[in-house]
C-alpha cells in the first residue's frame, strides 16, 4: 500500500467543483473566491506524519499556501483529532505560537479524542483576502524559475527532532542535529513571499514530494516545460549531512519553508532574499519537468519522509 498525498486526478472529476476563480487542480495551492470588492483565498491541509509540533506545522503549512496566492493569512480554523487527551496542550501551544508569528487568528474548529486514530491528526483551513491574486495564467515562456529557501527545510527539521537518536547512531553529530532543529521558524514563508509580490507571476510551495514535485506541478499547471539545472540549487549543510546518513533524496523531501517563484525579475528577488537561487526557466513544450543533463519527468515523485517513516529501520543498510 502506498502512503502520502493522493493525486487529485484520481478523484477530482467525481466532485462538483466550480463557482470559483481558481478551482481545485494540479499545482494550485489555494482556491480563490470573489466577494464584494476583493478576493477570498482559502486552503486546507492535514498534518499526519509529524510526531510532535503538529499544531505549529498545521498552521504554518496551511498559511503558506495562502501566501503563495499573494495574500496574508488572516484566519484559521483547525480540526484536532487526538489519540490521547494528554496531547492537547502541546498542540494548542503550537497553534498559538504559529498564529502569533504569522499574525492570524483562530476563528473556529473542532477537537475530539477518538480511538480511530493511532497518531494525532490536525487539519487546518487557512483564509485570507486580497484585492489581487497570483495566477498561473500570468506565467510566460522565458520567465525564470527561482527557488526561495533550501530544499528539505521541513523534512530536515522533522528528522532532527523526531529521530535524533537514530541520527546519532548513523554518525551525525549532535551539533548538526541541534542546528537542524532550529529550522522550525524557517518553515513560515509569509514575510519572504509577500516581500517579492511585485516581481513574481506565480508562486508554489514545495511540500510533499519536495522541490522536484513542486516544479513538476508548476509544469502541469502552466502547460509549459520547466527546465531546471540541479547545479544551481543550494542545499543547507545540515540537510546534506542528515539526508545522506538516511539515504534520503533532499530534492524529494517535504520542503515547507521553501517555494518556487516564477519571475521576469529574478535579480529583484535575490536582492530581497539571501537564500534564493535562479535554477531554471520556463520554455515552450510539453507539461514536463526537464532536468538539464538528466532527462524529463511527468510522473509524481514519491515523498521521501513518508517512505522513510515506513521503512526507517532498514534504511542505510543497503
Image (cartoon, rainbow, N blue to C red):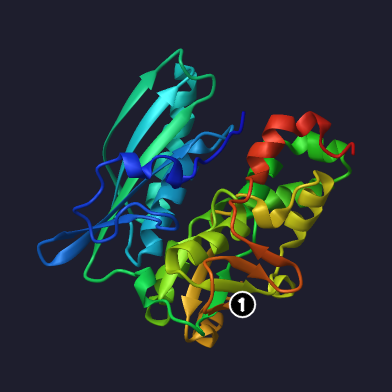
Q: Is residue 30 left or right of residue 296?
A: left
From this view, report whether residue 273 is shown above or below residue 299.
below
Q: Is residue 68 visible?
A: yes
Name the quarter where the C terminus is drawn.
top right
Q: How many marks?
A: 1
Q: Is residue 276 visible?
A: no
The residue singled out by tag 1 in the image is 280
Residue 127, image x, y percentages: 29, 52
Residue 34, image x, y percentages: 17, 60
Considering depth in this image, is 90 or 212 the residue closer to the camera? 212
Name the quarter where the N terminus is drawn.
top right
Q: Residues within 10 Å of mark 1 (few under 14, many from 20)?
A: many
Q: Quadrant of residue 223?
A: bottom left
Which residue is drawn at the image coordinates 39% and 42% (left, top)? Answer: 96
Q: Is residue 64 left or right of residue 72?
A: right
Considering depth in this image, is 186 or 208 the residue closer to the camera? 208
Considering depth in this image, is 96 or 4 the residue closer to the camera? 4
Q: Quadrant of residue 111?
A: top left
Q: Is residue 278 left or right of residue 136?
A: right
Which residue is drawn at the image coordinates 70% and 75% (left, top)? Answer: 232
Q: Secondary structure at mark 1?
A: strand
From this view, report whether residue 237 is shown above or below residue 61.
below
Amino acid at each position: 500500500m502506498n502512503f502520502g498525498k493522493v493525486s487529485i486526478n484520481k478523484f477530482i472529476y467525481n466532485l462538483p467543483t466550480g463557482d470559483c476563480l481558481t478551482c481545485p487542480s494540479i499545482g494550485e495551492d489555494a482556491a480563490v473566491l470573489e466577494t464584494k470588492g476583493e478576493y477570498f483565498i482559502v486552503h486546507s491541509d492535514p498534518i499526519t506524519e509529524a510526531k510532535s509540533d503538529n499544531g505549529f506545522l498545521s498552521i504554518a503549512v496551511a498559511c503558506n499556501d495562502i501566501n503563495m496566492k499573494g495574500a496574508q493569512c488572516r484566519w484559521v480554523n483547525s480540526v484536532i483529532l487526538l489519540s490521547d487527551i494528554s496531547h492537547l496542550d502541546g498542540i494548542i501551544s503550537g497553534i498559538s505560537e504559529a498564529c502569533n508569528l504569522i499574525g492570524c487568528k483562530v476563528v473556529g474548529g473542532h477537537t475530539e479524542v477518538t480511538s480511530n486514530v493511532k497518531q494525532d491528526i490536525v487539519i487546518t483551513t487557512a483564509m485570507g483576502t486580497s484585492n489581487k491574486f497570483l495566477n498561473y495564467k500570468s506565467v510566460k515562456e522565458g520567465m525564470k524559475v527561482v527557488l526561495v529557501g533550501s530544499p528539505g527545510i521541513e523534512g530536515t527539521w522533522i528528522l532532527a527532532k523526531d529521530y535524533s537518536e537514530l541520527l546519532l547512531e548513523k554518525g551525525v553529530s549532535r551539533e548538526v542535529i541541534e542546528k537542524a532543529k532550529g529550522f522550525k521558524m524557517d518553515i513560515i514563508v509569509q514575510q519572504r513571499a509577500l516581500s517579492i509580490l511585485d516581481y513574481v507571476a506565480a508562486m508554489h510551495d514545495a511540500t510533499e514530494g519536495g522541490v522536484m514535485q513542486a516544479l513538476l506541478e508548476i509544469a502541469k499547471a502552466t502547460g509549459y516545460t520547466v527546465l531546471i539545472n540541479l547545479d544551481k540549487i543550494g542545499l543547507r549543510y545540515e540537510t546534506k549531512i542528515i539526508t545522506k546518513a538516511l539515504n534520503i533524496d533532499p530534492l524529494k523531501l517535504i520542503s515547507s519553508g521553501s517555494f518556487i517563484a516564477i519571475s521576469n525579475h529574478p535579480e529583484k528577488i535575490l536582492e530581497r532574499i539571501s537564500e534564493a537561487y535562479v535554477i531554471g526557466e520556463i520554455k515552450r513544450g510539453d507539461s514536463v519537468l526537464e532536468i538539464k543533463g538528466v532527462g524529463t519527468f511527468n510522473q509524481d515523485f514519491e515523498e521521501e519522509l513518508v517512505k522513510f517513516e515506513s521503512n526507517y529501520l532498514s534504511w542505510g543498510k543497503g
